Image: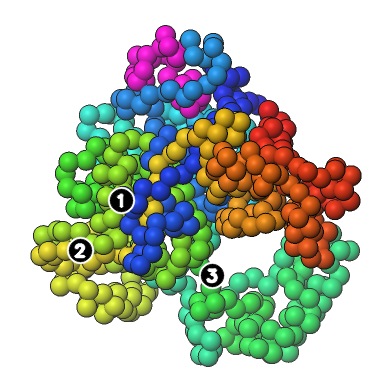
Amino acid sequence: MPTLEFKGKQFVYSHHLSVPFRELRVEAAKSLPAQGRQPSLDDNLIIHGDNLEALKALLPTHAGKIDCIFIDPPYNTGNEGWCYNDNVRSPLMQEWLKKSANPVDKEDLERHDKWLCMMWPRLCLLTDLLSENGVIFITIDDNEQHHLRELLDELFGQDCHVASIVWQKRTSPESRKRLGAAHDIIHVYSRHPQSAQVAKLSLTAEQADGFSNPDNDPRGEWVSTDLTAQNIDPSKRKGQQYTITLPNGRKVDPPPGRCWSMLEPEYLTKKQEGRIWFGVNGDARPRIKTYLSESEGLSSWSWWPNEEVGHNQEAKKEIMQILGSDNPFDYPKPKRLLARIIALATTSDSIILDSFAGSGTTAHAVLAANQKDGGNRRFILVECEEYADTLTAERVRRVIDGYAFTGSQRQELYTEKITWSNFAKNHKQILLQVEHFEKKAAASFDKIKKEIKDGVLTVTGERRIEKKVPGLGGSFTFCTLGDAIAVESLLTGQGLPAFDALARYVFYTATGQSLAKVGKPSIDGLIGETELFRIHLIYRPDPVWLRSNEAALNAERVEAIASGRRSDKKRAIVFAVAKFMSQKELTRQRIEFCQLPYAVHRILGD
């Protein structure tokens, strides 16, 4: 497979491995916990800090657990003023960055190399955080989209490309250009595209207009679909080659080169249930009924027009309404765009990560989705800029609690593309849909406005807000990045990591899996287990205790580990600063001793 070469690649190729693990420090004063609770890492998270280090900090708790990742990285237009300053150890790399321009601008002939150096290690960590069936969405424009596609092909594999979505971000041509860009690209990848979490979208009235009920079926409206399938090798599908007798007595066989799509017993069952359609007169080739009430919806496609998912101007209005006009976001993403991604790639309890959080649209969309369907989705935002608290988190606070606003607030309730043919055929159904949304929203709005413009029917709710927009509810914990978890500190007693932080760190290094909940310190030191191992940590962040005999693996602890193992045959891995047991006895008890701090480096392969 072709690979993309760029300046600095050999130095950043494994840079994500050398990034230190940092502890996530809870900032209680900036958090917004649920009533009666304390801020917790189990809640929604907003992390202020370098996103490379933040992603590394998330590995011990979230490796392989993120169901949906959305990132909106710098587009590298030359006008954004972003800096590339990753602390890559290579002297050659450091010398290059020292001599080159920072921030990156249009005059920097190496700006594409820097952008790729910045993206590579972050994508490596995002890949580690993504669940087996998770999906990653990355927005980009023509400055880097071709480079990004090659980068993702190399990291994930070409077969893991799900789609490259065209999002219509503008509503009109750019007057300053003869041929201006109206779209961005959203590259979509997954570890296993065939089993990726990509749901179908709910049917609109236009999409449902083909459903009808000519035979008054009690199951409701339906469409008929072909009951045959391609049959390249007749010898392999003999059970699907049979004769069907129509209600009028005529006998039919599958057309040449095809077979029935189901075995005869299944066909007879569906016929008895009334799920087979033979035409109005009972003389047509059989077709299978698909009911509107049982429909899973329609697959999305790679063209997302702005009337469906919003545009940049809409996003600006959203932020100005919540935060006011004084904000630095030139090209924010609309909430409807994130709502589409969440509808496609999450379930009601998914975790969604945005490591270039910016204006916090992802969190807003997650909270709105939870309010809509009663879900328990969680978001994790990472923002490196100083406005992480004053703008990103502040938007989330206001969305949760409600925010001061005076004026008219509009909310799009329903849209439908209208043509004369589908209106003439389905005007009753369309008007019933409009009436349904009017009645549903009547209590929440002062006025319901309906209009048809440029072939699109739009139903909009308008309400006069005098004091406060109602909140969506929810909570979050605000975090910063603490000092690096340096196990060498155990030798000096300076800067010792907390028990929970070290527990998650050694569990991840030993198993490659994240530890969602840390076991409480006990005599056997059990902190968590996998299908193969039980991991134990004997530790206190106390230099006097670490130098005492209590910190060692002794006979009493070995007995507790053995008795706690019950009847399973999992191996026990014990992290401690010392042991008072022979290796022969530990081997007999299926215990592997890992001395702190040295064994961590042995496991990591440093």
Q: 10 Å neighbourhood of mark 1: few (<14), some, or many (≥20)? A: few
Which percent across, then down, holds residue 202?
45, 67
Image depth: mark 3 or mark 1 in front: 1
> Left or right of 335: which side holds 296?
right
Q: Check the picture and name the quadrant holding the N terminus.
A: top right
Q: Over which residues does the magenta segment extend?
A: 96-118
Query: Which numbered disc flags the more N-terminal residue, 3 or 2?
Result: 3
Which percent across, then down, holds residue 81?
32, 25
Label 1 secondary element = helix
Label 2 secondary element = strand
Q: Is residue 595 above or below residue 248?
A: above
Mark carried by residue 469: 2
In this rendering, the count of numbered labels is 3
* Residue annotated with mark 1: 29
Q: Is residue 125 visible?
A: no
Image depth: mark 3 or mark 2 in front: 2
Q: What residue type is labelled 3?
A: Glu
- Choose top left, top right, bottom left or bottom right for residue 430: bottom left
Q: Check the picture and name the quadrant holding the C terminus.
A: top right
Q: 10 Å neighbourhood of mark 2: few (<14), some, or many (≥20)? A: some
Query: Which numbered disc flags the more N-terminal residue, 3 or 1?
Result: 1
* Residue annotated with mark 3: 296
Mark carried by residue 169: none
Q: What residue type is labelled 2?
A: Val
Q: Which amino acid does label 1 sit on?
A: Ala
